[in-house]
Amino acid sequence: MRIRTVGVDELEILRDIERVAGACFREVGMPEIADDEPPPVAVLAAYRRAGRARVAVDPADRPVAYLLTDPLDDNVHVEQVSVRPDHARRGIGRALLEDVARRAAADGVPALTLTTFAEVPWNAPYYLRCGFRVLDEERWTPGLREIRRREAGHGLDRWPRVCMRRELVNHR
């Protein structure tokens, strides 16, 4: 699986990937999440321009998964990882995470962070297998606290959420 930067003409494809990937939330009793609209093209374009959007592509160079990141408290925050369900369980999400981890470590970043649903199998349990650990609330950084505040404002606290962190080995 090849990972590369997102092309300017691929932003709507990212929205499609998130829609089909999000549909899986319906199966675990979270239709509100399944029906949530992906970020607008303008938001995805800003991630692309900032170099914070990566895609995994199939042999025909078509995106099948993507990852977005934000700088947060001197770390790299994984904002979104979405994999088309017909490409799931092939290590593509993990490959995207490893790609961002290598890049961040090379830049001297100490850790990756993310927030996610605690009990959804392809969320916190998956990220634990990818080397993340759940942070106790007293270990949340100011940026993570702000993200959790916004998530609560969007109603995401209806389901248990966690902040997670993965330490990086820096290769400066």
Image (tube, rainbow, N blue to C red):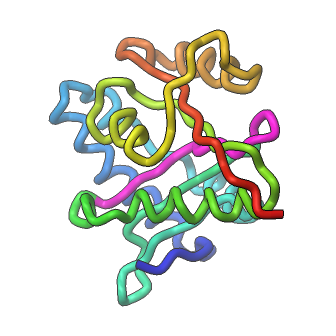
Identified at 81% across, 54% down, the residue is 108
- Does 138 appear above or below 43? above
| Residue 164 at x, y percent in the picture | 54, 31
Q: What span is colored magenta in the figure?
A: 72-84
Point 58% across, 43% down: residue: 79
- Left or right: 71 as drawn, with respect to 162: right
Is 80 inside the magenta-drawn segment? yes
Residue at left 53%, top 14%? Answer: 152
Q: Quadrant of residue 46?
A: bottom right
In this image, 54 relative to 118: left or right? right
Q: Where is residue 138 in the image (x, y as percent from the top left)?
A: 65, 10
Instruction: Please state which of residues 152 and 123 is positioned toward the viewer in this rendering.
Output: 123
> Nearest the camera: 89 or 55?
89
Quadrant location, the C terminus:
bottom right
Q: In which quarter of the image is residue 71?
A: top right
Q: Give percent across and percent down for residue 6.
A: 59, 71
From this view, report whether residue 29 is shown above or below residue 124.
Answer: above
Task: Work out which quarter of the rendered image holds the N terminus and state it.
Answer: bottom left
Q: In this view, does 71 lie to the left or right of 150?
A: right
Image coordinates for residue 51, horizontal then vertical, percent: 72, 64
Single out the residue that lies furthest toward the bottom. Answer: 60
Left or right of residue 116, residue 167 in this image: right
* Residue drawn 52% across the image and 72% down it: 10
Please tell me whether the stretch drawn in magenta is mainly helix, strand or loop. Answer: strand
Q: How many marks?
A: 0
